Image: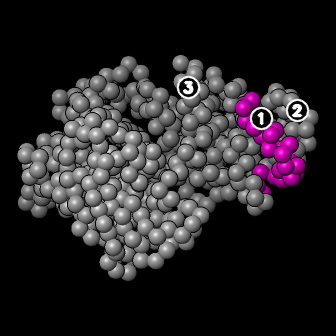
Amino acid sequence: MRLISVFFVFFWFVSPSVWANDSGISLLNSTLITKLHLDDIDNKGQMVGAYLVSFRNTSKKPLTRVTLLLNPSLNYTKATGPKNNLLSISSNVTAIAGYELLELNVAKVQLPEPLGAGKRTEIVVHYKGYLTNMTYMAVEGIKETLNPSFTMIRADSFGYPVFAEASRSSIDAAFAHKPFQQVAFIDYPGTNVIAGNLGISDKTLDGDNNSVTMKNPVLTGLFSAAIAPYSRLDAGPVRVSFLQANRASAQKFLAMTAGEAQRIESLLGQPSIGAELRFIEVPNGYSDSGGHGTFFREARAFDAPSIEPEILTGILDLWKVNGGGRPGHWSNGLDALVRVAVSTPQNLKTLQQSSFDDSLTFFKTDKRIGKTSLADYAIDGFSNQSDTVSTLAYAVLNSILGPEAFFEFVKELRIKVRGQYTDVQMVADFMKDNLKNKAAKKFAKNWFSSGRAGKDMAKAKSFEDLLGRYK
């Protein structure tokens, strides 16, 4: 169990670097528009859709085309560029490398002009057709069709265009894409309810037709939504959408997860603005999916005796300041330390020493780092080192202050910076004005404001040595 906990701590801390998409683009924002016709017969269910996506070229070379993947029973109809100009698009149902039987409709879309490194553009892709049950192609648990009893629109079934090459590794990278801004407009018939990783901001009913607008105030992972006869229970920031037979289990599960959220709130204050955690039931036989604040789970998950590590991570993410996962963000070190201190305090010593060892390597490699305050890391070109060094700095503050005083400090800091632009200098100023403990105040000044960390690290061989200079 200790090894599992360490893994989750490590994965959370390094995850921004694993979010790279090997298709050479980064999605910035998207609008999905789709109209559904649902039917008990698979190939009579139909959808018509348009996917508007703004993206940036993250490669070092000019980008001349992008590759898109769709469910094999969906067909591309056209693609347009930023000036509504028609783009050349060629597509074919193709076997996907790395899968035994999977075939997808693979399209190559030619950009109107080469897109330089770091530049952004947008395209709109139009498509129509129906969804094939992908378990027939040995993709376990991705079995949705456009059925009136239950259906899903998600990247896992390629129910809208996915920006990836025709290989398993590229698809995995696309599915792990960092959160970004998204909006969806979904039209569907019937009395069922839609639940997904975007909240419902508007809904109108015209006869038998539902027109739903979905969006979030925070960045979100690739869009996913299910349409079924859902009921919903809420407690604080936790939402549980369940199928009718499972109310008792859903209530029990909500009490457990919302109770953990309440415990963390007592330590850290209110969650980050707009943060919600959604659990959405899927029928038996459908694969678990989701992340970034939304989990699609079979009914049995609601009867679990304890909170599984992935869901505990989701609860903790409600308090994560850097929801977009950008490396070098002012809060990354604080988020990393707080996560361990709240969820697995038994792993604090491991994090303390590993952040010390990695920081010491940085300090020995480039002497300038030791003479630079954390407030100036971004200015002086040390953003790549700031996450690790700031984690070490917050670990020292936590040890000087003790858990109770440290969490009170974090709570006050979160209130101070909530909803406004923040950088490390602002945090350093807050420490100067609010830290009363003399040792903590001196440490914060030396590391966050004065660039004296190098002198400390030169005389320390371990985290305990470093801490001993202030206790």
Q: Are marks 2 and 1 in contact (CB under 8 Å)?
A: yes
In depth, the one of 157 and 254 nearer the eye is: 157
The residue sitting at 64% across, 25% down in the picture is 347
- Tag 3 secondary structure: helix
**Residue corresponding to mark 2:** 460
Residue type, numbered disc 3: Ser
Residue 430: image x %, image y %? 72, 51
- Tag 1 secondary structure: helix
Q: Is residue 78 left or right of residue 317?
A: left
The residue sitting at 49% across, 52% down in the picture is 21
The residue sitting at 32% across, 37% down in the picture is 100
Residue 408: image x %, image y %? 65, 37
**Residue corresponding to mark 3:** 5
Q: Is residue 442 left or right of residue 407?
A: right
Q: 177 above or below 118? A: above
The residue sitting at 54% across, 69% down in the picture is 62
Residue 399: image x %, image y %? 75, 30
Residue type, numbered disc 2: Ala
Which region is colored magenta? 352-377
